[in-house]
Image (cartoon, helix red, strand yellow):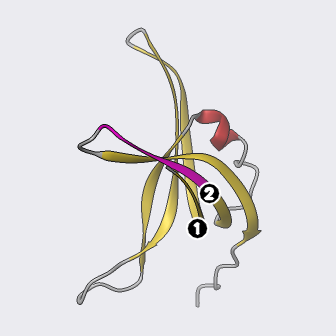
Amino acid sequence: MEMIARSTIRGAKFFRGNIDGKDLDSGKIFVDVELKGETSFGICTQELKCEGSQLIESIKHNTFPFIAELTMIEESNGKTSTKKVIAIKPLQAVKEPKAA
């Protein structure tokens, strides 16, 4: 299943290399998520896996945080499902309030 979401990206990281003879290429973004519940308020960040390091490298020139349109796919093995970001389209910078 493919879905599109708009989210604030706070940070990102990637790794491309070899560990113990295994080639790895991964990326992650960290997005704002609202806290829910009677005793929770505000926002926190959630980690989302990306298709690979090239996706992160394509956004690293942006000023963080920024609002982006994310294209994600959800896959399942029948028991558990996972989401993976396959495209990121930056939309606008987020102006953070200045600290007092």
Instruction: Say what secondary structure mark 1 lies in.
Output: strand
Q: Is 59 located above or below residue 31 in the figure?
A: above
Q: Is 38 located above or below residue 92 in the figure?
A: below
Front residue of 69 and 15? 69
Q: Residue at x 66, y 62 (%)?
A: 69
The residue that mark 1 highlights is: 7
Instruction: Say what secondary structure mark 2 lies in.
Output: strand
Q: Amino acid at mark 2?
A: Leu
Of helix, strand and loop, which mostly describes the magenta segment? strand
Q: Residue at x 71, y 49 (%)?
A: 59
* Left or right: 56, with 1 as reference point: right
Count of number-bearing discs: 2
* Left or right: 74, with 7 as reference point: left
- Circle 2/circle 1 CB separation < 8 Å: yes
Residue 44: image location, x then y, percent: 41, 71
Residue 89: image location, x then y, percent: 72, 56
Tell me where the magenta segment starts and ends, as one range: 71-77
Q: Amino acid at mark 1?
A: Ser
Mark 2 or mark 1: whose residue is earlier in sequence? 1
Q: Classify residue 38 by image quadrant.
A: bottom left
Residue 81: image location, x then y, percent: 33, 47
Structural distance between the alpha carbons of marks 2 and 1: 7 Å
The residue that mark 2 highlights is: 70
Q: Residue at x 58, y 91 (%)?
A: 100
Q: Residue at x 64, y 43 (%)?
A: 56
* Left or right: 90, with 34 as reference point: right
Local crowd size for mark 1, using a 10 Å CA cut-off: few (<14), some (14–19), many (≥20) = some
Residue 60 lies in the magenta-colored region? no
Front residue of 51 and 94? 51
Q: Classify residue 66 by image quadrant.
A: bottom right
